[in-house]
Amino acid sequence: MQNSKFLSAIFAAGVTFVLACLMLGVKLNTEGTTLQVEGASTEQWTWIGLGIAVVFLSQLFSAQIDAFFSGLPKPQLAKVLPEASVMARLKPWLLAALIVGMLVWPFMVSRGSVDLATLTLIYIMLGLGLNIVVGLAGLLDLGFVAFYAVGAYTYALLSMYFGLSFWICLPLAAALAALFGFILGFPVLRLRGDYLAIVTLGFGEIIRILLNNWTAVTGGPNGISGIAKPTLFGLEFTRRAKEEGAMTFHEFFGISYSSSYKVIFLYLIAVVLVIFVIYLINRLMRMPIGRAWEALREDEIACRSLGLNRTAIKLSAFTIGASTAGFAGSFFAARQGFISPESFIFIESAIILAIVVLGGMGSQIGVILAAIVMTILPELAREFSEYRMLLFGLLMVIMMRWRPEGLVPMKRPHLELKQ
Amino acid sequence: MSQLLLDVNGLTMRFGGLVAVNKVNLAVKNRQIVSIIGPNGAGKTTVFNCLSGFYIPSEGSVMFNGGEIAGMKDFQISRQGLVRTFQHVRLFSKMTVIENMLVAQHRHLNTSLLAGLFKTGSYKRLEQEAMDRAAYWLKQVDLLEFANREAGNLAYGQQRRLEIARCMVTQPELLLLDEPAAGLNPNETKELDELIIRLRDEHEISVLLIEHDMGLVMGISDHIYVIAQGTPLADGTADEIKNNDDVIKAYLGEE
């Protein structure tokens, strides 16, 4: 027993050594036309050595470490929070305070943070959308980014060719993404599990490659630039109005021009959209259709025997999830002002899925928290940007060990029979 | 003669070269309890699967209420009023008892997206009706006090009863029970016996039953079919079956 522990510790240390050597220990430099291998500095080697020692010791004493951690008193949430009845009364006030806070907050912080918050809100929207498909209906979708792309390109193309405004395109983009979800879902939803994952993965790639190669319409890899920004009842947020006779925001209110108005306006739109999506999903979970998703995930055969049309039910989850992504996509296009197929690669799908899994499948609060973590963490750790994927991996491993059910495991709203 | 509720003629199911069910005929009248018995592996559950649309029969016709249902999709058949239970309990175990009952009434509810989002009058009314119906049937099977429990936490006998209640709440005309007494103790079996008779006499539905508990079968059946190795062996009332030589041979072997 002791012996095997020692062996496994040596093995882990060895793996760490090999990995660290390849990634940190040596460097390639271009010298004219040749490449030269250069060793790292002594300081770096010391760090690597330390890392190996830590891995070795933690493996060797893993039992003791585990015992130590399990001995620690667990934080008792139930004791800190007031009782359920008090919570129920406090809840609307807390929610109101949160919403007001989110609306006031951008006026007090820097432009950069508002921008980052807007990006986070986009990922929250995407996470919530995928959460319907994966978390609630239990359909593994690896090509979710395709619907995001459909939404973004719907707005970009309609705005470019027909000059339609953002507000008209928003529902159109959602509808078109839903239509794509429907078209894809129809043949695909008879597949299950891994097979479904592979087909959706392929679909995601098809959409991206289509956008990349249909140069005549989509501009191919060059993308579409100069997409119109959203307006507030026709008021633009530019320095000067684009069209003759049109007013800009600062002219209308007689204030001096500031570029941060636009950023804050976009942020506020995103907040409203996210609140709308959250409300929608909350209602859905309590509606017959939400119950049917849940039931279908638990036992498909029983559902069939009770007269539930499983294709229709799965399709509804797929379609509603896709339309959320369409929302997020058209907003993304409006915010960026420039989109190209580069924004819709597979990694995006993976990140959105990671958000859902990290947050806890089916859990809305969990998904929101995970979206915040997944977008803000890379920004905070900018110096480590080369090791971003490494950090993601680390995060996932820690999650698996610490909370395999996600940050905030799903708690379904149970329907009660009043007697 | 009154019209048959279920009229099965020459039902055959082949899996490749294997004939699992061979030219089975069944007839169920309104308000009748009919049993199918037979040794293990005789093809009883396969018959159920064919009737409820889980399999599409290779040959034969299945008339339900005067209409052909062979070849229809499973959910369409159950919407016609032919609902089944399973040999192994299939509940939505993470959902509460009352939610199990509501899922079963999915098609009776207003499932329109907008109606649910805005909680329209008809949505609320149908939801309330479904709740009342669920409560009524839970009371019938003595589970009302457990309505807000998770279904997976119920005792086995209660899960069995919940499965029957969940079928009944879909308002069927014919209930197919696949070994409902399996795993029940004698007391529970007796209660089940009474429940099935009540379903026929008070709620005026027919029951088609697969069962190994001969006491139960002989006690309540109006008519019994015997199947052995996929082929019909005999049919008749309980007394006729008890004294049928072929049946005794199939169960006990030849001397």
Image (cartoon, coloured by chain):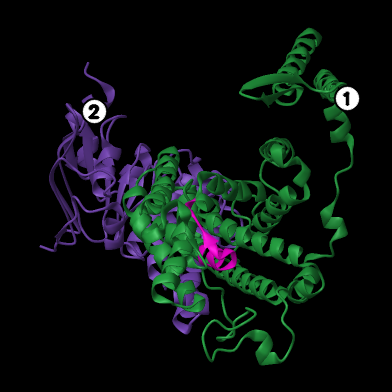
Chain colours: A green, B purple
- Mark seen at residue B114: none
Residue A63, position as x, y percentages in the image? 82, 23
Residue A108, position as x, y percentages in the image? 82, 73
Viewer-proximal residue among A250 and B214: A250
- Residue at the outermost front position: A32
Provide the chain ID for the residue under circle 1.
Answer: A
- Residue topped by disc 2: B248
Report the mark closest to the observer, 2 or 1.
1
Task: Kindly report the secondary structure that dominates the magenta region of the rendered protein.
Answer: helix
Marks 2 and 1: CB-CB under 8 Å? no
Viewer-proximal residue among A383 and A207: A383
**In the picture provided, is A108 more to the left or to the right than B51?**
right
* Residue type beneath disc 1: Glu
Viewer-proximal residue among A386 and A41: A41
Where is B77 relative to B190, above or below?
A: below
x 56%, y 76%: residue: A230
Marks 2 and 1, how far apart at CA:
89 Å
- Residue topped by disc 1: A43
* Residue type beneath disc 2: Ile
x 40%, y 39%: residue: A195
Q: Residues within 10 Å of mark 2 (few under 14, many from 20)?
A: few
Label 1's element? helix
Residue A98, position as x, y percentages in the image? 76, 71
**In the picture provided, is B113 more to the left or to the right than B250?**
right
Residue A344, position as x, y percentages in the image? 50, 51
Give the quarter of the image for residue B244: top left
| Range shown magenta | A329-341
Provide the chain ID for the residue under circle 2.
Answer: B
Image quarter of the C terminus of chain B: top left
* Residue A189 in magenta stretch: no
